[in-house]
Image (cartoon, rainbow, N blue to C red):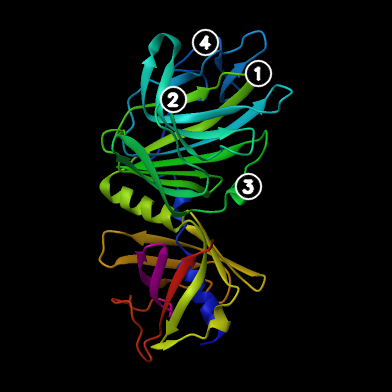
Amino acid sequence: MKKQLLLAIALGVALIAPAAETESGFTAIFNGKDLTGWDGNPKLWSVKDGTIVGRTTAANPLKGNTFLIWTNGQVADFELRLSYKITPNNTKGFANSGIQYRSRIFDPANWVVGGYQADFEAGDTYSGILYEERMRGILAERGQKVVVKETDGKTAKEIIGTVGNSAEIQAAIKKDDWNDYVIIAAANHLQHFINGRPTVDVTDEAEAKAAKSGVLALQLHAGDPMTVAFKNLRIKTLSAVTQSKDSDIARMSGTWVIGSSEANGSPIPDDESAGLTVTITGEKYSVNKDGQIDRGTFSIDTTKSPKQMDIHPETGPGAGRLMHAIYEFSGENLRVCYATQDGSARPTVFKTTPDSGEVMISYKRKQ
């Protein structure tokens, strides 16, 4: 098996990421003109240049956190996309905010909300974490994959893996500039992404405390003067099928290395895959091999058994091909078996045979 073919194959496997660029099924929840559909303290919240702006000053400080609450319904299973910018207007250089979801209103007169929060800040510690405002506190720190349980009336957090390196995620977050935030909540599975990078992956199994639905709100934090801005807010309600698809795409996001591989019934030598990494963001992928980077897109169908994938390399030796594949997860590993010839029949089992023209690769998430 030549290295170029392995690269093309890896390219295909990485393909778990193109449809995230489409906006099918999303509805705008901010009209870009005024705060119709939102409720908050008018002294603190306004619309400027097509963005929602929350601002505190030294002359108008906050003693407690307050929120701008979306009034057009509650959220349950959904994907939310938006852009944010946070600016610390103080000598400490710090400001904090967040996006509340599946939350509840504690004090309507002062717009006080508590519940799940996708956190972000002007500092280097909290952006991307899952924080539960006024309740259980930090449920997952940045980079963590966590299962939350209730044991003897106490919250127990089990770290079962990682979605990325915390410092590397932070390095990709822009200071005093616009960043893209995505929140996916499907049943008890909660995921956050900033600038296309997964930041936390949480399964909340504490049945009595895990919120299934609630309000959506934007936070303005107490403390030193600050400004926070939001734009391009849009949301999609998830069906059982879209939940499964979005969950798998989110699970594929990140950087992978090859654990084992075979072609036509025989193992591929390790030296042919050494140093190869695959990075998946949404439904786009890139493959880096010895400094050569190739890219493409893919689509998946989670309704089939085994689950199916169609890979569309855009550059490299496989450019212009359509490769049919099947995939499955095993713990933190991803296994893909696909036909290497353009338009060839899709594999049906996770095994290759002599002269089949099929390749199977098992990926391990890069730590």
Kind of residue indicated by mark 1: Pro
- Residue 19 image position (x, y, % from top left): 44, 53
CA separation, marks 1 and 3?
25 Å
Residue 20 vs residue 119, the one in the foreground: 119
Kind of residue indicated by mark 3: Ala
Q: Which mark is residue 172?
A: 3
Residue 347 can be seen, yes or no: yes
Looking at the rendering, the stretch of residues picked out in magenta corresponds to: 324-342
Residue at screen point 56% across, 45% down: 195
- Quadrant of the frame with the C terminus: bottom right
- Give whichever of discs 2 and 4 has the lower sequence position: 4
Residue at screen point 70% across, 28% down: 93
Asked whether, in this view, residue 261 is left or right of residue 272, the answer is left
Identify whether 189 is placed above or below 178.
Answer: below
Identify whether 169 is placed above or below 77.
Answer: below
Q: Are marks 1 and 4 in contact (CB under 8 Å)?
A: no
For mark 2, what is the residue? 217
Kind of residue indicated by mark 4: Pro
Nearer the observer: mark 1 or 2; the answer is 1
- Residue 86 image position (x, y, % from top left): 62, 29
- Give whichever of discs 3 and 4 has the lower sequence position: 4
- Give whichever of discs 1 and 3 has the lower sequence position: 3
Nearer the observer: mark 1 or 4; the answer is 1
Q: Are marks 2 and 4 in contact (CB under 8 Å)?
A: no
Q: Are marks 2 and 3 in contact (CB under 8 Å)?
A: no
Q: Which mark is residue 225?
A: 1
- Give whichever of discs 2 and 3 has the lower sequence position: 3
Quarter of the image for residue 239 reads top left
Q: Secondary structure at mark 4?
A: loop
CA separation, marks 2 and 3?
25 Å
For mark 4, what is the residue? 42
CA separation, marks 3 and 4?
33 Å
